[in-house]
């Protein structure tokens, strides 16, 4: 299928302009992104918290509703991938690098550097650090992914629409979903996707650099990160050209296997009983404070509000910016699943895996901090390697960690090129190699330009800015999905059948 000229070229022009600004006038770009990001987090923080909470409510409603038995596809459609492979692909695309970058650093940061509740360095501070980490990597982010993935899968496989964000809004915009309005929506989705994926690639490059610096004394600078991105670009291009059934599938299973090995290593050689106790306690406090944390804005506490802007609002924006990419990819690999099965595997299962991961690495990091080795004094990208230094075979498993980061880097970029190819070829389920190569190069160049113009802060700022307009589209997608599902529920008589059965049983 040929590319969609307007969406492809307009998106390309906007992103090329951003890259040129990052290279030619980096200070100006950094100043603009800083100012815009500050305005958005201060003025729209309440909106981000509210809209993400709505996504959570909608998915839980669909999970328990009779609507949940509707299949994402025709009655005879079968899933393309096994459940373990499906889950591995969902997880690798959806969170990947974030686990390695923040697994040790975030709990340590909340405990020893900047506390969400002011309980810095205390026993209560440990518990608070963990429950807020659970908030950032649990139900809420996966609800964002689940919302867009479910909507796309439903309209693509159930309603026969092309796999484009704009086509999911046909119940709202009608024929305009095929015109200028639809193309504008798809352009916003492409820009958001590039910003989200480029941010993660930047984090990945920084952490690989951090590991090489910590282990081998390699210089930590733009030159090293450029070389890293160049090498990884070649790797994910090779993967992308092999197709989704080979490259992404094989690498997803591979890095999940390596991640499990690293996870078990830290769990066994770390403070195992402390980790188990911490997991159970944190899971309980997370569920207990779930609603409170979901809407926490701290309007009368400037320090707490600043923390919320830097962490929670940043995360919600990051997940929203990533959501077109992850959502399109999740939809692509979810043919033949029921809505209920989809929600369990996209919302519940990844959340539990994230909770376990952060408890093991966060708990081990905090235990190491308490023993006298200051992980909190290390750079964020070095925290994982600082943790592993205190364990047997530290060099072996530190190198393993770098390999995992690289494979997550490759799967994220590979998935990103595939999704961007779909978005700019009228929803093609198998975009051409040329299109994937074009987007792969642009993703890497964008990550480099943003790193050059202001490092990780520029990546974060740009991504938060890109997320705002797309969040409005996400809200419209939820409304469109509910509207269409309610109509199908009525046509299939799902609710009426259940009522009739109960009435018959009473008789």
Image: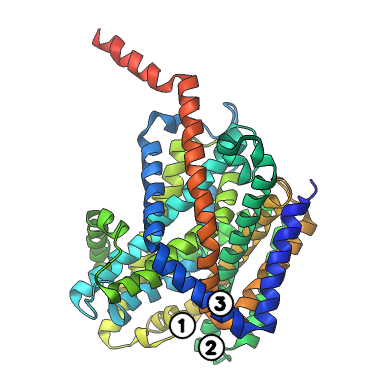
Q: CA distance from mark 2 to mark 1?
A: 8 Å
Q: Does residue 55 appear in this view?
A: yes
Would residue 413 appear left or right of 347 to someone viewing this image?
Answer: right
- Quadrant for the N terminus in the image: top right
Taking depth in this image into account, of 324 and 97 the one nearest to the observer is: 324
x and y percentages locating residue 323 in the rendered image: 53, 55
| Residue 133 figure quarter | bottom left
Frontmost of labels 3 and 2 is 3
Between the residue at mark 3 and the residue at mark 1, the CA separation in whole angstroms equals 29 Å
Labels 2 & 1 near each other (Cβ < 8 A): yes
- The residue drawn where x is 52% and y is 78% is 456
Which residue is label 3 attached to?
32
Structural crowding at the residue carrying mark 1, measured as other residues with C-alpha within 10 Å and reported as few (<14), some (14–19) or many (≥20)? many
The residue under label 1 is 382
Say left or right for 400 vs 265: right
Please provide percent x and percent y for residue 68: 43, 33
User: Which residue in the rendered view is the most extreme toward the top?
Assistant: 507
Camera-side mark, 3 or 1:
3
Q: Position of residue 197 (x, y in %)?
A: 59, 64
Q: Which mark is residue 213?
A: 2
| 441 relative to 398, above or below | above
């Amino acid at each position: 299928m040929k590319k969609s000229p307007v969406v492809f070229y307009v998106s390309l022009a906007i992103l090329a302009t951003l890259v040129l600004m990052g290279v030619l006038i980096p200070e100006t770009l950094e100043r603009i992104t800083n100012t815009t990001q500050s305005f958005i987090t201060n003025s729209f923080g309440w909106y981000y918290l509210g809209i993400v909470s709505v996504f959570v409510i909608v998915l839980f409603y669909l999970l328990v509703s009779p609507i949940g038995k509707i299949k994402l596809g025709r009655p005879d459609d079968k899933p393309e991938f096994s459940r373990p492979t499906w889950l591995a692909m969902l997880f690798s695309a959806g969170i990947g690098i974030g686990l390695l970058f923040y697994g040790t650093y975030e709990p340590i940061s909340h405990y020893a550097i900047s506390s969400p509740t002011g309980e810095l360095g205390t026993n209560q501070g440990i518990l608070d650090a963990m429950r807020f980490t659970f908030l950032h990597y649990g139900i809420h982010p996966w609800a964002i992914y689940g919302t867009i993935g479910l909507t796309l899968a439903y309209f693509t496989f159930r309603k026969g629409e092309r796999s484009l964000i704009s086509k999911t809004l046909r119940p709202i915009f009608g024929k305009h979903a095929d015109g200028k309005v639809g193309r504008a929506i798809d352009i916003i989705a492409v820009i958001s996707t590039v910003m989200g994926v480029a941010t993660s690639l930047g984090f990945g490059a920084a952490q690989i650099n951090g590991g090489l610096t910590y282990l081998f004394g390699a210089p930590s600078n733009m030159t090293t990160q450029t070389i890293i991105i160049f090498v990884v670009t070649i790797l994910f291009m090779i993967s992308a050209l092999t197709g989704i059934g080979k490259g992404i599938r094989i690498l997803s299973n591979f890095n999940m296997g390596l991640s499990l090995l690293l996870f078990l290593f830290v769990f066994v050689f770390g403070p195992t009983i402390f980790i188990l106790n911490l997991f159970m306690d944190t899971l309980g406090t997370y569920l207990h404070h779930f609603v409170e944390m979901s809407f926490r804005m701290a309007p009368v506490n400037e320090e707490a509000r600043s923390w919320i802007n830097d962490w929670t609002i940043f995360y919600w924006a990051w997940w929203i910016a990533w959501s077109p990419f992850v959502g399109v990819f999740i939809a692509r690999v979810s043919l033949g699943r029921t809505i209920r099965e989809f929600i369990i595997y996209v919302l519940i299962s990844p959340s539990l895996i994230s909770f376990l991961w952060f408890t093991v690495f966060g708990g081990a990091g905090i235990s190491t901090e308490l023993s006298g080795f200051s992980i909190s004094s290390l750079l964020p990208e070095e925290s994982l390697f600082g943790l592993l230094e205190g364990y047997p075979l530290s060099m072996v498993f530190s190198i393993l960690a770098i390999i995992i980061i690289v494979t997550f880097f490759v799967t994220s970029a590979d998935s990103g090129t595939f999704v961007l190819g779909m978005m700019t070829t009228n929803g093609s389920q198998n975009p051409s190699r040329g299109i994937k190569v074009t987007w792969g190069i642009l993703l890497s160049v964008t990550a480099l330009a943003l790193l050059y113009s202001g490092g990780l802060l520029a990546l974060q700022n740009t991504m938060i800015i890109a997320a705002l307009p797309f969040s409005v589209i996400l809200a419209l997608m939820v409304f469109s999905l509910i509207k269409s599902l309610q109509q199908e529920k009525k046509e299939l008589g799902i609710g009426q059948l259940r009522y009739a059965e109960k009435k018959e049983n009473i008789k």
